[in-house]
Image: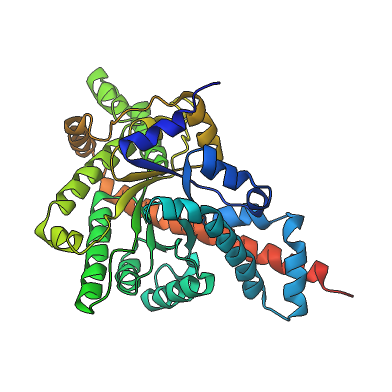
Amino acid sequence: MATNHLLEISAYGQSIWMDNLTRDIIKSGELKQMTETGGIKGITSNPAIFEKAIEGNKIYDEEIEAGIRKDKSVLEIYESLVFDDIRDACDVFLPVYEATKGLDGYVSIEVPPTIAKNTETTISEARRYNQAIGRPNVMIKIPGTAEGLPAVEAAIADGINVNITLLFSVESYVQTARAYIRGLEKRVAAGKDISKIASVASFFLSRIDSNIDSKVDKMLAAATDEESKAKLLSIKGKVAIANAKIAYQEYKKIIQSDRWKALSAKGAQVQRLLWASTSTKNPEYSDVMYVDELVGPDTVNTLPPSTIVACTDHCDVDNRVENDVDSAYKLMETLKEENINLDEVMAELLEEGIDKFVKPFDTLMKSLEDKVKQLVPA
């Protein structure tokens, strides 16, 4: 029997979650099998994933018709579909959650992306989602925007598991970690238990390389001397992994701080870095490079189904998250020398990221509205 390389990763302290959720894989038993024999320890969803799952899929028609009979709005029907899938997935992953004592077994659901810039609404929706789903292993996704981070703090203080999403810059990760710590400290001050709260900081990868590679290609076309060309070529396809490795160094500093140690002594779980957007967009690069290069302790990697298949077949697993860290810092200096402003790139990617979730959410609402009209009895 061929080796499933995905199963080797847990030995290095990294958990593999799947970046995809559909009712089909829940009902068929495929998801349960993946948790039992495939090495999958959690799952994430987002509006783009649900758009693909629901649009044009007859498996949801009966529930949509039931919603119509109860005179539910399109948004209420959407939530009933999604919440049911999340609850069912949570039940599938509950044995993982229990076996790992709350380290893994989480199912992530994102608050509506349309509220990414509204702190108070994000807080109220995080609370409502958490209560409505009613599972100990649900994780509420909140974007790591300036407005989202106070919501993260409030949700953690409430005892809600939080997945902070759309992180691109190292600084945004550091701010996220601080929000998590502040939330835990508030909970401690209120005399409440912090040992059963989990959080991950979702650090996006491939989108960074796609953005910077595009800029580099334009600069290469205009470059005349060989030294400049060589410098530019050394950047291509390297920035996302270097950026992630630097973020991991910040994580290590955070967990060595006195502030964190005080929380750890009270049972706090570390907020793990989660590598997201890990499907390689450029066919010239290895299709598992965002897996192979970032295996290491206290991390999670979320893989879409295609990357799960690729990694199962040919991942080269080793603890590499702290390899070539000096080179990672040097690469950031090279970006500055070539006048590539990483802060601007990260800000641009955050705005694009919100838009990439808002558009499928709006499309899904429209397609559900159309389906409701089709299914309404004449």
Q: Is 190 placed above or below 54 here?
A: below
Most distant residue in the left direction: 258
At x 35% / y 39%, what residue is drawn? 212
Quarter of the image where one finds residue 84: bottom right
Residue 356: x and y in percent read 50, 55
| Camera sees residue 133 | yes
Residue 97: x and y in percent read 44, 54
Residue 252: x and y in percent read 18, 47
Work out which quarter of the rendered image holds the N terminus and state it. top right
Foreground pick, 260 / 346: 260
Foreground pick, 234 / 206: 206
Most distant residue in the top direction: 226
Drawn side of residue 154 relative to residue 186, left or right = right
Foreground pick, 235 / 227: 235
Q: Is 145 placed above or below 315 here?
A: below
Most distant residue in the right direction: 378
Drawn side of residue 311 relative to residue 216, left or right = right
Q: Is 215 placed above or below 234 here?
A: below
Foreground pick, 30 / 334: 30
| Camera sees residue 295 | no
